[in-house]
Image: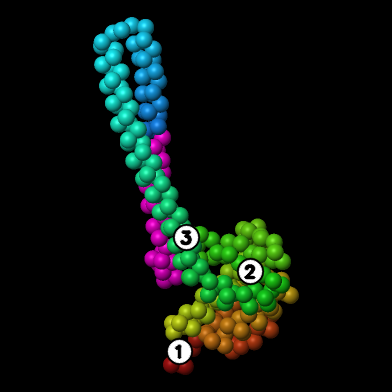
Amino acid sequence: AEARAALEAATPDLEAAEAAFQRAESVQRRAESEARDLEVAISGLTGRIQSQADEGLEETCTELRGELDAARARLAAIEAEVAALTRLRGALEAARSAAREQYFGPVVEELRPLLGLLFDEAAVRFGESSLLPETLTREGQDESVEILSGGMREQLAILTRLAFARLLARGGRPVPVVLDDALVFTDDARIERMFDALHRQARDMQVIVLTCRQRAFERLGGEGLALTPWRPEDL
């Protein structure tokens, strides 16, 4: 929750700028349509004036020309607003990218050695609206996290939690990482590499693993705890 709040506070209000940009574009299209309609009307009246020297039509044509000039002036103002909003949108997108890089850059760096325990030359990219990896890059090939196996997604999620916790610990705000019945879909070969990752991070913070799969986790190491029956006489 703190991480999401910090990201939202650091991200510019791009949605508001995008709404203003779309509104200005809509007004511009309407103004352009009005200008075209007026030009058609003037063209028609001009033809009628040439064939009929009618004073009333001449006055109407003069009025329409005035309306056309006013419409063109409004269109010019709208085009200037659209151009300004376009520049604003670009600036906000650049600011948002910079804020995300500043926020997620350390996380990606913290994840790099952990990913190296599982994959060769691997990296991740985070999504625009979440604090979870969206793309896994292996050997130069991008893969959406959604199409990965259940075990691989589970491993990435755990490694991401470890990376965030490591950064909090380095910032003087250590928090324990609690894994409850984790690594359910991880095969035997990768589960030991995940054990290595847990031990690597446990040097700087507390990692608590809760599991009922004792045989699968017997090679995890660390301090083991077990539940014992409660007896009133022990009080």
Q: Which amino acid does the dot numbered 1 rest on?
A: Pro
Q: Secondary structure at mark 2?
A: strand
**In this orientation, which residue lies closer to the viewer: 193 or 8?**
8
Q: Secondary structure at mark 3?
A: helix
Q: Which image quadrant is residue 107 in?
A: bottom right
Residue 178, percent from left and from top: 52, 77
- Disc nearest the viewer among 1 and 2: 2
Provide the residue designation for mark 2.
123
Q: Which residues are magenta?
A: 1-29
- Lateral position of residue 155 relative to residue 103, left or right: right
**In this orientation, which residue lies closer to the viewer: 86 or 132?**
86
Q: In whole angstroms, how far apart are the C-alphas of marks 3 and 1?
A: 64 Å
Near mark 1 (Cα within 10 A), the count class, few <14, some 14-19 or many ≥20, is few
Write the residue at 42% across / 52% down: 87
Magenta stretch: helix, strand or loop mostly: helix
Write the residue at 37% across / 28% down: 34
Q: Which amino acid does the dot numbered 3 rest on?
A: Ala
Q: Is residue 124 magenta?
A: no
Give the label on residue 37, or none.
none
Quarter of the image with the N terminus in it: bottom left
Q: In the displayed orientation, state which residue is furthest to the top.
A: 52
Provide the residue designation for mark 1.
232
Q: Which image quadrant is residue 120 in?
A: bottom right
Q: Which amino acid does the dot numbered 2 rest on?
A: Ala
